[in-house]
Amino acid sequence: MLKRLLTLAMCLCLTFGLGGNVIAVESDGIDVIVNNAVIELDVPVQVEGQTTFVSYWPVVRSLYPDAQAVWQNGQAVVTAAGLELTIQPGRPYLVANGRYLYMPQGTRSLGGTIQVPSRVLAAALGANVSWDPVGQDVVFTAGMGPITSGSAVYQEDVLYWLSHIIYAESGNQSLEGKIAVGNVVLNRVASSKFPNTVYEVIFQRNQFTPVSNGTIYATPTEECVIAAKLCLDGANTAGNALYFINPRYSPNSWASRNRPYVATIGAHAFYA
């Protein structure tokens, strides 16, 4: 009953936060369960909107008893059998076995402890996570092992061309804007209206200016490569957009006149 009251109070705080803003709320009423056992947390769970932030280390240690963690170059580095995980406060992604997993909400810090979104942490650890509405608990269950490595998942040619078009079209944009451009390319691959490979989508006639002016061949920056990896691992900032334009240079484009508007991110407007 106490946990239910605490959770209700937390939800009310989230709904009626100061100025109507959603705020992070600590709750001692939420337990974290790993493989049917409640684990001891160094700091309480935090909830912000639809995201539950948990301390990464108690969960890692419970799923991987051999794990070790050190602090190097401003980030937490975790190693265990088959796992290498890095978490840097303030960075909107974590890296697990070379896979880039997007955390648009970033990390949280409480009492000097790094907290990450529970679903992203579970994906990195190859685990499942769910919310128990009866016990009001966050429940992790071990899977078959850590996340598959990036070298086994990211196809070399796909990563090559996706990172190149991201750089050519949005190299001067934010990470969010870079991801959005990658989303458009992958959305086209998935659409029956366009070719079904990244290369063919990019080189489809009269679609992307960098192909005609040659900038598609310029070497992408590290962040553009990261943006491509984030896209390939499911990061999405552009929804179902199939087109993007720069309104400054194309104020009366075909897309803006004929397609549903999705969002504006940096210099680009996106359309479905």
Image: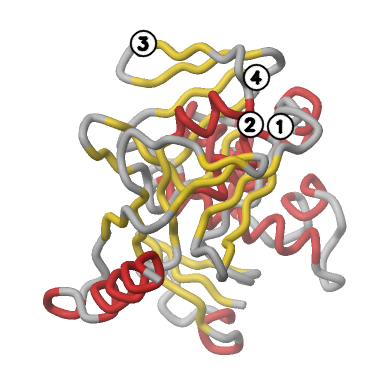
Give the residue type at disc 4. Answer: Leu
Give the residue type at disc 1. Answer: Ile
How packed mark 1 is, by other alpha carbons closer than 10 Å (few <14, some 14-19, many 20 or more), is many
Sequence-first disc among 2 and 3: 3
Horizontal side, residue 264 vs residue 128: left or right: left
Disc 2 to disc 1: CB gap under 8 Å: yes
Nearest the viewer among 72 and 44 is: 44
Residue identified by numbered label 3: 72
Horizontal side, residue 233 vs residue 45: left or right: right
Badge 1 marks a residue whose secondary structure is: loop
Is residue 38 positioned above or below 78 on the image?
below
Residue 244: x percent and y percent?
Answer: 54, 67
Sequence-first disc among 4 and 2: 4
Badge 2 marks a residue whose secondary structure is: strand
* Residue plotted at (45% across, 70% down): 269
Sequence-first disc among 2 and 1: 2
Taking the image as drawn, is residue 262 in sight? yes
- CA separation, marks 4 and 1? 8 Å
Residue identified by numbered label 1: 147
